[in-house]
Image (tube, rainbow, N blue to C red):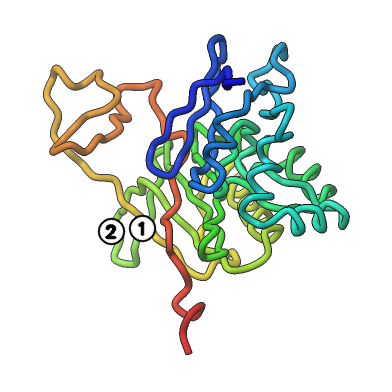
Amino acid sequence: MPSNNIFERFNDEVHIRRDGWQHVGLTTYREDYYNELTSSTWNFTNPNSNTDDKGYLKSSSLGLLHRYIMGKWYGKDVLQDMTEHGYVVDHMNNIHHDCRISNLEFLKKAYNTAKGQMFDVDANRLNHNIALTIFKDFRTGCYQITIGCNDDIYKIDADRTVHHLASAKLLYDCDYAIVINDAENILRIYETEQQLDLGNNHSCDIKIQETEKISITEEEANHPIIFRNGIGYINRGAGNVWINSVYYDEGWTPLSKYSD
């Protein structure tokens, strides 16, 4: 029986749609399970919810999508063993229909509950100020905290040079729980002190991108996105436009990770 969903592949992502859905399901493409994935019908577990969260994606034949994907990437034996030892599959960005492998990680159930009550709430509340997201690069095993600066955030050098920040990325080669704690601290300090503290953490590398100033025409003044040479720039002056998330740098590793 054919699936009732519509599947679209964009590079290494699979988008899952269905008539009447407000959200697009996301997962990671891999040839060995693509036919099985797209032969099943996926539904939300709580479609009638009054909130934006409609629950998880589930198939009657393959089960919950996030567990299905983790079983494919880590192996069913690992998934079963982690489950028996009290781990659940955590959606790092707390978007339950985002089942890309970069958004999934094993986490002790107690930590998962605490994350949902603190970090996930804070990250959502402050998203229009600093869009902070955690990713895991499956191929390197490293985590990244990425930050999109919706507020006008800047740092000042010793010579008083002011640098306005567009985004920041922090690389981690440690336990996921430590990454969550650092992410929560970044949010807490920003909310209480209006400072983006990128120095007091357990990251092993950092990348910062400054904002680019471009001249705009009078006609472009109210456009949320300005394009130059095929590149889109967010126009902060237009209002009601912001970054939701900054994607991670695939393949980024600490210099010491593969050194002799």
Q: Position of residue 11 (x, y in %)?
A: 38, 42
Of all residues shown, which one is farthest toward the front? 1
Residue at horizontal 55%, vertical 20%? 5
Q: Position of residue 174 (x, y in %)?
A: 63, 68
> In the image, which disc is placed on residue 204?
none
Of all residues shown, which one is farthest toward the bottom? 260
Say which quadrant the N terminus sits in.
top right
Residue at horizontal 47%, vertical 47%? 147
Q: Nearer the viewer, residue 241 or 189?
A: 241
Q: Nearer the viewer, residue 155 or 180?
A: 180
Q: Nearer the viewer, residue 214 or 177?
A: 177
Q: Position of residue 66 (x, y in %)?
A: 67, 40
Rendered position, 223 above or below 199: above
Report whether 82 appears left or right of 243: right
Q: Nearer the viewer, residue 135 or 225?
A: 135
> In the image, which disc is placed on residue 156?
1
Query: In the rendered structure, which amino acid carries the disc numbered 2?
Result: Thr
Instruction: Describe the element under mark 2 as helix, strand or loop.
Output: loop
Rendered position, 160 above or below 194: below
The reply to whether residue 199 is visible in this rendering is no
Residue at horizontal 17%, vertical 36%? 230
- Disc count in the image? 2
User: Dividing the picture into quarters, in which one does residue 252 lie?
Assistant: bottom left
User: Dividing the picture into quarters, in which one does residue 40 lie?
Assistant: top right
Instruction: Describe the element under mark 1 as helix, strand or loop.
Output: strand
Q: Could you tell me if the residues under marks 1 and 2 are in contact, i.e. CB atoms within 8 Å?
A: yes
Q: Residue under circle 2?
A: 161
Badge 2 density bin: few <14, some 14–19, many ≥20, Cα 10 Å? few
Q: Position of residue 225 (x, y in %)?
A: 27, 27
Which numbered disc flags the more N-terminal residue, 1 or 2?
1
Badge 1 density bin: few <14, some 14–19, many ≥20, Cα 10 Å? few
Query: In the rendered structure, which amino acid carries the disc numbered 1?
Result: Ile
